[in-house]
Image (tube, coloured by chain):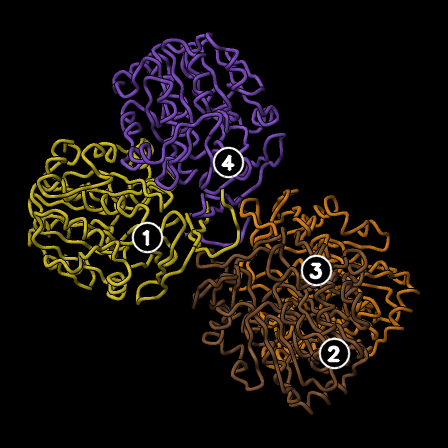
Chain colours: A brown, B orange, C purple, D yellow
Amino acid sequence: MSSDATGIFINETHTSAAIWQYRVEKMLLEGKTQYQTYQIANVPRFGKSLFLDYNIQTSLLDEYIFHECMSQPAMTLHPDPKRVVVCGGGEGATLREALFHNTVTEAAMIDIDEELVDMVKVHMPEWHQGAFEDPRTTLLHEDARGWLVREKGNNWDVILSDLPNPHEDGPGQMLFTKEYFQICFDALGDDGVLALQAGSASENYPACMVSCIKTLQEVFPHVAGYYGMVNTFFQPWGFVLASKKHDPLALTREEIEARHAARGVKTKYYTGRFHQACFTLPEYLEKAIDEQGRILTDAEPFVWDA
Amino acid sequence: MSSDATGIFINETHTSAAIWQYRVEKMLLEGKTQYQTYQIANVPRFGKSLFLDYNIQTSLLDEYIFHECMSQPAMTLHPDPKRVVVCGGGEGATLREALFHNTVTEAAMIDIDEELVDMVKVHMPEWHQGAFEDPRTTLLHEDARGWLVREKGNNWDVILSDLPNPHEDGPGQMLFTKEYFQICFDALGDDGVLALQAGSASENYPACMVSCIKTLQEVFPHVAGYYGMVNTFFQPWGFVLASKKHDPLALTREEIEARHAARGVKTKYYTGRFHQACFTLPEYLEKAIDEQGRILTDAEPFVWDA
Amino acid sequence: MSSDATGIFINETHTSAAIWQYRVEKMLLEGKTQYQTYQIANVPRFGKSLFLDYNIQTSLLDEYIFHECMSQPAMTLHPDPKRVVVCGGGEGATLREALFHNTVTEAAMIDIDEELVDMVKVHMPEWHQGAFEDPRTTLLHEDARGWLVREKGNNWDVILSDLPNPHEDGPGQMLFTKEYFQICFDALGDDGVLALQAGSASENYPACMVSCIKTLQEVFPHVAGYYGMVNTFFQPWGFVLASKKHDPLALTREEIEARHAARGVKTKYYTGRFHQACFTLPEYLEKAIDEQGRILTDAEPFVWDA
Amino acid sequence: MSSDATGIFINETHTSAAIWQYRVEKMLLEGKTQYQTYQIANVPRFGKSLFLDYNIQTSLLDEYIFHECMSQPAMTLHPDPKRVVVCGGGEGATLREALFHNTVTEAAMIDIDEELVDMVKVHMPEWHQGAFEDPRTTLLHEDARGWLVREKGNNWDVILSDLPNPHEDGPGQMLFTKEYFQICFDALGDDGVLALQAGSASENYPACMVSCIKTLQEVFPHVAGYYGMVNTFFQPWGFVLASKKHDPLALTREEIEARHAARGVKTKYYTGRFHQACFTLPEYLEKAIDEQGRILTDAEPFVWDA
């Protein structure tokens, strides 16, 4: 096993328990936007990878796992997703996954960081795969919450909330609260579905994910947590699906496969066969919902204290 | 998020992709046996943890996940597990899990590293919980393979192969081969079940696990891979169950719950509810079985090349 | 060159430029006093080493360099050092060096951290070499500044100020100010000499050392900076000598050798031959005195901002 | 003190004792030649820095210290240096220092790594400061030893051997042997002077420097070790001066200052005032010459075993 101490590394902190040194074979690009620093680097075995503020975001090894989890359960649950919103989603891969559904006629992506998306367009084609050029796409650079407020009653079908974790005073903190989820609810139609990335699904730090579950239960009738095994993050990653009418746990393998076939969607991780495994949470998460979950509000948002 | 660079760390290499620095709050014990170096340390959030040759083995945060996965699916699948073998299993927690089944009358643990087990008895009571003192236990310090050869035809019910990964020239390399698995087969009775820890279940390095699956399929009629989310290892961890008669995938939630109730077993991770999720492998593992799996033999054992 | 990433390390921060990972072969002792955390560890090539608050303090490789620099120039400069004060000096090695001078009749060591000194007595005999048991020694555990105030007019011959760097709100901050140096002046006799460790002598962070020089010049007629090459600190280390009557730069090789011979002192680093080299500061330090040096006062003490 | 664990780092190994993580503010350039990998990066406080094979080579903070030590003592010692050879010296700063002497009429730089020098010309102007364009310069890309063999009897005045450390099977290993030093001797005129960088002058690993001293004493009548405090290397750095006729230790402050003035040379580290301090070796180096020094030959070259 290669254990050469020398080389270039990007160091990320994983709670107080560990520091992870990602080995860099080649630094491809570095820069800084108004909101964050970024690096694109080749990491051995992971391949081309994006780091924001020294936290790995995605790698070619398994970006499909994160982005299918981000988009496909929500898109599949909706019986006829035509109009989709992506909040955040800088790399364009969440958008890409949504557009795979040939039912989609309109996709609005609202990412505040224009400089980052401009960089992604040029340097991360493996992720967006042309999604930004799709005629169904509208790309906007503003605060997603502010935009969604104005969309109240506009009957969107699916909202995919692919936002940075709610670090203190970070841009994401107010996009993980009951008030924000209500805004999403109000912008969705009757069949509407919301999915969000919700932080770690590991036993070490499930507090964010389970608080998202608990908070969404205040707003939506159907709420279900699920996770994807994102090796790039060195932990299972949590997502939450919230739905006005359709119960994600009632979706069968056959329905999923039929919908994917009808809509021209091919998935590699979130498949009909795997749906139930994704949505079956380990006991430690079920327990953490009760013990660590908290209703997040604008007045008392999530406080990262790992 | 705490990201203080200063402090004490134990550094582990995760393939060529990364070095992990586990933060040590307090070094509790250090030593060296004939076979390996060890440290017991308090890691923030993980709690008391054991490192062997600078690789984390187990922590109080989630040792139950590893050890339930190591023992419970095999123990549960067997209709009446009376006589159990633990190969390796130094901490005593695999043995502990087996002994939870009140059907058990005899448990032989064969771990070559006597010095390590002697240390564990004194310093890791949270793991063994008295299992070494259980009157049903026989503890032997010799090579597990050599011992099993002599047990041919002795009709053991369950073998739990909790051995170090097959690193080159390491003590485990010849305990991950077709010949070894045949020796296990021959030592088991007609209802016999073998479980082994099989390395990472991540997309980054599934080669060992999938080769174990492929190799076991040469020897046993029923073979099924499964995994546990061991946060302490920063990756999902792979196990394989091999069975002479009973199909693990046919086991229902109800049967599992009934057997656990009847035998006085309480689990926290491997529950009836969660059985199917554990045994549903993600597509990347299914694909890796075909693409990276290889039949391991004494002549051509696994070669770690991460 | 050994470059194995795996192992145990104590990580120290060297300004914003670097993090140093000291490899630990064996952790010998860990603990915490009211004032600081400590580790005694075997570091390859450096040997047994002491860390305080995760900063290496001393190693067997070259502790003699630090401690001779701390004690010998001042002791040697004084024509007849009988009564010596050590401020701080936990390991007892500064005291040891002073006691080598057979002129000494009384040595008071004032170190506030009694728990640390108690530990040192038992676990670091290579450093103190029995100095605490010397009948000439008086060991006190209180604030050195407070003690020195009461010694005004008591005509001590030499004060060796071996104190932690003046980190903000740390115990050392008020022991690097003009007021403190005046207190030292007042406690010294007419031939009195003060020496202090003064932080890095590297071009990277000379601000503390040069400010000490500048501040001492306000109080003492003779002030001279010097340095020792402490490999354990990965940088040349700065000291300052301040004297009421005798000019350190006028001391000749022959005088030093004669005094050492007469007093039974044998040195390995600070020798008559090497005196001048120690006291010849590189231009960057001379320049830094002008450009970065500042008069430190109780109202405006040194602020560490590396 | 900033001790943020997160960020980009280049990790270098310092013997088995430590790993140094240099923090990278900005990666400016990365690449690979036939001989080595390189990075140019901004390091906090050190500024723009060059790494070769993940070992820091030079930074703007104190490159003048290394390069003055590399060139100025030899150039100054020669009574009239007209024709100068630089062996290696990629950054062009050793050449730059030599050319400062207005006595020089011809400077040949022999660096085997053409790709690296081409990169340096464009990206490291702060180092070469136009030296490659100086009409007195001839730049050649071949093995320096082979070139010097052909220069036998060609009466060069000064040879500056600015080569990589003699790592096993590395390009530098045969440029630190008695045979190589004899080749230098034969290429020099009667007043000829050779200087070489000779590795660490720290007590931790002086073996290379002291072996160079011992080996050069076999070939040249006057040999003197000296060192510079290169903070960028986190240790004092060793050099050796070998001379056919002139004794470096006999050079006075006044002569140095006079020669510098006459030749239009301005130095910042190696000044007349500081000459003696540079050439006064600490006792541990004097002792290491006897105890660790070995005569290096082509048959038994230096073996790096730190």
Report x, y in % for residue A103: 66, 89
Going by the numbered disc 2, the residue's amino acid type is Gly
Going by the numbered disc 3, the residue's amino acid type is Cys
User: Chain for mark 4?
Assistant: C
In this rendering, would D268 be left or right of B211?
left
User: Chain for mark 1?
Assistant: D
> Residue A290 falls in which quadrant of the image?
bottom right
Q: Which residue occupies 16% across, 46% down?
A: D194
Of residues A120 and D124, which is closer to you in this image? A120
Which of label 4 and label 2 is nearer to you? 2
User: Chain for mark 2?
Assistant: A
Going by the numbered disc 1, the residue's amino acid type is Gln
Q: Secondary structure at mark 1?
A: strand
Which of label 1 and label 3 is nearer to you? 3
Report x, y in % for residue C227: 35, 30
Separation of disc 4 and disc 1 at Cα?
Answer: 30 Å
Q: Secondary structure at mark 3?
A: helix
Mark 2, Cα crowd under 10 Å, few <14 / some 14-19 / many 20+, is many
Mark 4, Cα crowd under 10 Å, few <14 / some 14-19 / many 20+, is many
Residue at numbered disc 4: C48
Q: Is residue C245 above or below residue D273?
A: above
Residue at numbered disc 3: A208
Report x, y in % for residue D182: 15, 50
User: Chain for mark 3?
Assistant: A
